[in-house]
Structure formats: structure tokens, C-alpha cells
Amino acid sequence: MALDPQLLEILACPEDKGPLLYFEDEQTLYNPRLKRRYRVLDGDIPDLLIDDAETVDDAEDARLNAKAAGDGITPTFEQ
């Protein structure tokens, strides 16, 4: 199950309040500015608790940014 498109339009990082990238196949939301990844539980419940976020390393950041560019994944909203 994927996140509701209307929900995606308003989802923001709880720390910097900026847009996120949604990787449906990995069930994650990603903030490339802070290199933080948030899980999506049960396919439709975003876990946006800062304490639950995972900070990724440079290699994973590069992979996620390349995947977003290659798959046409856009931010949840425009700043």
C-alpha cells in the first residue's frame, strides 16, 4: 500500500520543515538536506519522529539522490 497522494502533498520533515522524497518501494521518506530517512510503517503510516529517524552516510545519500533523479521522484511539495 502506498501513501495517500493528498497526505504526501503536506508531509514535511519534522526537523527542518522542508519537503521529503518518498521511495514507495523502500517504504521510506528521505530528507536529502539533513541526510535523514524516515520509515513508513505498514505501507501507509509515516513515522516522522525525529528520534526514530536514521541518518545515512554519504554513499547512501548519493544512492538515494541518484535513485530519485532516475525514477523521477519529486519532493512532497515545493518550497
Image: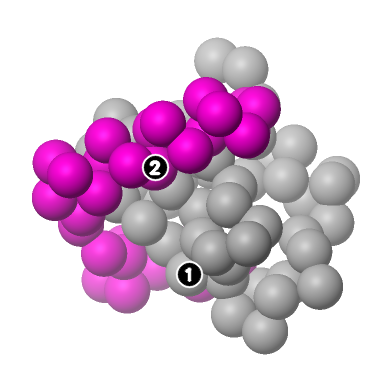
In percent of width and height, residue 7 lies at 78, 51
In percent of width and height, residue 47 lies at 50, 71
| Left-right relation of 10 to 47 | right
Q: In which quarter of the image is the C terminus?
A: top right
Label 1–label 2 contact, CB within 8 A: no
- The 10 Å Cα crowd at callout 2, few under 14, some 14 to 19, many 20 or more, is many
- The 10 Å Cα crowd at callout 1, few under 14, some 14 to 19, many 20 or more, is many
The relative height of residue 72 versus residue 16 in the rendered view (above or below) is above
Q: Does the magenta stretch include residue 41?
A: no
Q: Name the residue under label 1.
A: 39
Which quadrant would residue 62 be assigned to in this image?
A: top left
Residue sticking out furthest to the top: 79
Residue sticking out furthest to the bottom: 42
Q: Quadrant of the N terminus?
A: bottom right
Disc 1 residue type (three-letter): Arg
Out of 25 and 28, give the one closest to the viewer.
25
Q: Is residue 54 magenta?
A: yes
Please state the extent of the stretch shown in magenta in the rendering. 46-74
What residue lies at 59% left-to-right and 48% top-to-bottom? 22
Q: Can residue 75 be seen in this view?
A: no
Which quadrant would residue 8 be assigned to in this image?
A: top right
Query: What is the secondary structure assignment of the residue under circle 1?
Result: strand
Disc 2 residue type (three-letter): Leu
In percent of width and height, residue 59 lies at 17, 44
